């Protein structure tokens, strides 16, 4: 069974655009790792007005993005009165953590290469 993860980005602060750790680099590493693992993944822009957890993190100057599975309908439930743990199954958590760890390792290797 394939899990479709949507990688939703937010523009990095200007001072971080030349860094190896920007949302663009994070998304690229995640997409490469997903492809290598045979996981279906897409990068999509966030529809305007839908609050997600990474936005205040990015506003604080820390590169971030949201990884989620679902449809636009499920995205509309996020941070709304009908948002509840009852809607979560948790069956993709381990695979997502593995995906993120692989992507971070990929970025670490790229950073080491640039330092040489």
Image (cartoon, rainbow, N blue to C red):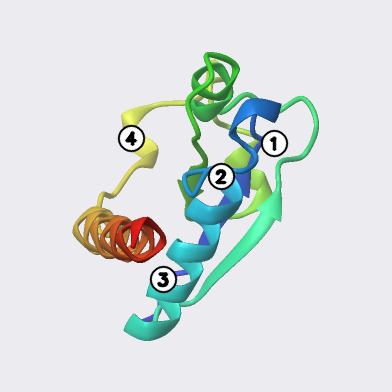
From the image, tell me which residue sits under label 4. Answer: 86
The location of residue 57, given as percent across then percent down, is 49, 21
Mark 3 neighbour density, 10 Å: few (under 14) some (14–19) many (20 or more): some
Closer to the camera in the image, 61 or 99: 61
The residue under the point 40% across, 78% down is 39
Front: mark 3 or 2:
2
Which residue has dot 3 on it?
Answer: 3
- The CA span between labels 2 and 4 is 30 Å
Cα distance, mark 3 to mark 1?
25 Å
Which label sits on residue 11?
A: 1
Neighbourhood count class around disc 2 (C-alpha, 10 Å): few under 14, some 14–19, many 20 upward: many
> Label 3 to label 2, Cα distance in Å?
21 Å
Q: Do the numbered discs 1 and 2 sit on residues whose CB atoms are within 8 Å?
A: yes
Report x, y in % for residue 61. Answer: 53, 20
Contact? badges 4 and 1 (CB < 8 Å): no
Which residue is denoted by mark 2 in the rendering? 23
Residue 12, position in %: x, y? 64, 34
Find residue 99 and name its label: none
């Amino acid at each position: 069974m394939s899990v479709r993860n949507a990688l939703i980005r937010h523009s990095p602060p200007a001072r971080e655009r030349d860094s190896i750790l920007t949302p663009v680099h994070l998304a690229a590493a995640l997409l490469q790792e997903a492809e290598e693992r045979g996981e279906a993944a897409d990068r999509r822009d966030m529809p305007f007005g839908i609050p997600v957890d990474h936005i205040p993190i990015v506003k604080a100057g820390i590169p971030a993005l949201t990884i989620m599975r679902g449809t636009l309908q499920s995205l509309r439930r996020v941070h709304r009165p009908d948002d509840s743990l009852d809607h979560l199954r948790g069956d993709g958590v381990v695979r997502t953590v593995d995906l993120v760890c692989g992507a971070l390792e990929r970025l670490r290797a790229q950073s080491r290469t640039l330092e040489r």
